[in-house]
Amino acid sequence: MSELLRATAIGTDLTRVEGPAKVRGRAPYAYEHPLEEPLHLHPLCATIARGRVSSIDASAASALDGVVRVITHHDAPRLADTDDGELAILQDERIGFRGQYLGAVLAETPEIARQAADLVVIETDAEHHDAEFRPDHPGARAPEGGADDVRTGQFDTALAAAEIVLDQRYSTPIEHNNPMEPHTTSARWDGDTLTLWTSTQGAHPAKQTLAPILGIDPERLRIISPHVGGGFGSKGLPHADMMLAALAAQVVPGRAVKYAVTRQHMFAVTGYRAPTSQHVRIGARVDGTITAFGFDAVSMSSRTKEFPEQAIKPARQMYAGAHRHITQRVLPLDVAVPSWMRAPGEAPGMVGLEIAMDELADACDLDPIELRARNEPELDPDTGLPFNQRRLLDCLREGAERFGWAERDPRPRSHHQDGWLIGTGVASATYPAFRQPGSKALIRSVASGYEVAIGAADLGTGTWTALTQVAADALEVEPEQIQLAIGDTALPHATVAGGSTGLASWSAAVITAGRAFRREHGTSPAVGAESTGEAGKNPAAQELAMHSYGAHFGQVRIHEPTGEIRLDRMLGVFSAGRIINPRTARSQFIGGMTMGVGMALHEKGELDPRFGHVVNHDLAEYHVPVNADIREIEAHWLDEEDPQAGPLGARGIGEIGIVGAAAAIANAAHHATGVRVRELPVFGDAFLPR
């Protein structure tokens, strides 16, 4: 067990350290770093889903005043490693998906670059493609390197013998991250050294990925990213836009190249959440006890590079049941490459699971919270390990009290008001509690206090502030004495801000460095005194099943004549260990819950299989929640610490807010209308007479 850090600054709602710089426009995002006479890049992109480039005529573009260079696969620099199909761009004539990079125009202004790109004539030879996702597709297979299937007991026999049987299919669509700051990179080569000013959730992990592909010593690649305007997972892995900027800058050595992905093109080249189909089969006794549990998921991927949206992850550990059958399959198609989106796997996987639990509660004539209580596992069903802190029922019960659940009439269509049907729903939330080893921190004494350096990332989530609080407590000083430096590979190594691991992982390094500093230099250190610390592995993770939990409650109203659906209120209660900063934590929880509202009611990428193209590829037609859609939303958490999670006593909170939120809203819609919707998003036409 790690000794918990004494909390003085931790737990206070310190205002954002970087806030004044942001509101004054002095916090530089990737595109805003001042660079001398940069060139501007506009890409050339494939307009077919599969085939080859037969010819490229860039003569008219090259003749345009202000154009410096047009690059294609004919003259782009060669990469040292082409195994990563997403990043190995401009290496040959093959086309794997619509929107794939085929080249780039470099010009003195963005406008000239875009105009010139329109003048480039690209001829292609199209081949037969397949871009239609369906769960019964014969091409579906086990994912490469994915989790093994779960087959315990005699599932088929137990399901056939069950007193209550639920057998339903659920689906989630393509969803897109769409952070406010688009994916942006400025690149410059100085001899054999490359600098990228880029928007990334992990400067060091991006460096480790890109350097060997480019064939350069990692020490010759510097990535700078002190401020990130959102990511939601899409900036957790390097995508081809970074590589395109790097290759383009290589052909104009000494000049910087700036590239901001357009909003429309972000729907093709910066990752997205793949659609899923989920087949849930549950056998239970009449008292609600689950005897057989089956969950079979299929997700779409790309032939260019596999990424499975593993929707089975929460089903493996949420509820008891001796006879289990859980499988994940992936369907590679001729589509753009999917990637991380907030709570990959858990967010879509809890949709089918938690709607199914609501249906099972109805079939057993049980309150949905009571059904979950009757199926609480004593040990983790997936690993057999004891749970660390499984406080799901505490979250459900506190949420029920805060929400007024006891006043609910369980009968569907029981609450009418001025032509509106009103319903309430509940769903559980879970997310694993990971801590990544390997982050390092450096603390140095300066005249005004202490410099704390670590290559962490702040996506707008509060890293600047929370790490300042952690460092202050580690050194037992006031936060005003901490000068934090993050977001640069020139700083000590830090792991990615992903998987809700960022703060817990980085803080372990900062705390270790702070304790070493006091041990080595005392409380009156000389200016220039310094110490380092590194985050190691968490031994408890091998002995305990470590997860965070939560409960979502939602109330919707549905206009009976038109099917219009509105969210009245939403409440979340979470168990996530110690909360470092209530102000930024509440923002994180509410942000996740709001994305859950988007999953439930708004977001759907419409892929036209004839062209392999998402047709609603802008924020005019790809809808996300806005202020008018979010009327009353509250986030609360249990007052707790988790010493097994590490010296901070905290588990990550970035993703659990979205997990289960969409299911709570879908369940509320059923309670309001009696209509069960199993396909997200929940659109109003589902409630109109057929």
Image (cartoon, helix red, strand yellow):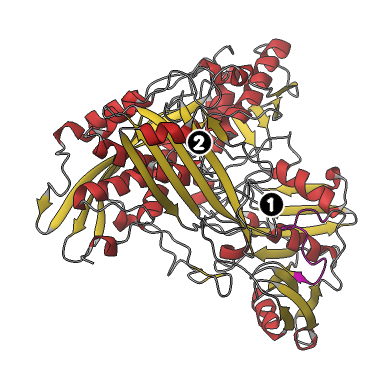
Residue 548 in picture, x, y percent from top left: 46, 28
Q: Nearer the viewer, residue 201 or 421?
A: 421
Residue 281 in picture, x, y percent from top left: 41, 41
Q: Which residue is found at the position 41% from the left and 50% from the top?
A: 169
Residue receiving disc 1? 238
- Residue type (three-letter) at the residue carrying disc 1: Pro
Q: Quadrant of the C terminus?
A: bottom left
Q: Is residue 19 above or below residue 102?
A: above
Of marks 1 and 2, which one's residue comes earlier in the chain?
A: 1
Q: Which residue is found at the position 53% from the left and 61% from the top?
A: 133
Q: Secondary structure at mark 1?
A: loop
- Within 10 Å of disc 1 (Cα), the crowding (few <14, some 14-19, many 20+) is many
Q: Is residue 467 above or below residue 541?
A: below
Residue 601 in picture, x, y percent from top left: 35, 56
Q: Which residue is found at the position 62% from the left and 32% from the top?
A: 483
Q: Is residue 534 above or below residue 254?
A: above
Quarter assignment of residue 397: top left
Residue receiving disc 2? 325
Horizontal arrangement in the rendering, residue 192 relative to residue 436 (left or right): right
Q: Nearer the viewer, residue 317 or 283?
A: 283
Mark 1 and mark 2 in contact? Answer it, CB < 8 Å. Answer: no
The secondary structure that most of the magenta stretch takes on is: loop
Residue 353 in picture, x, y percent from top left: 41, 40
- Residue type (three-letter) at the residue carrying disc 2: His
Q: Which residues are magenta?
A: 82-94
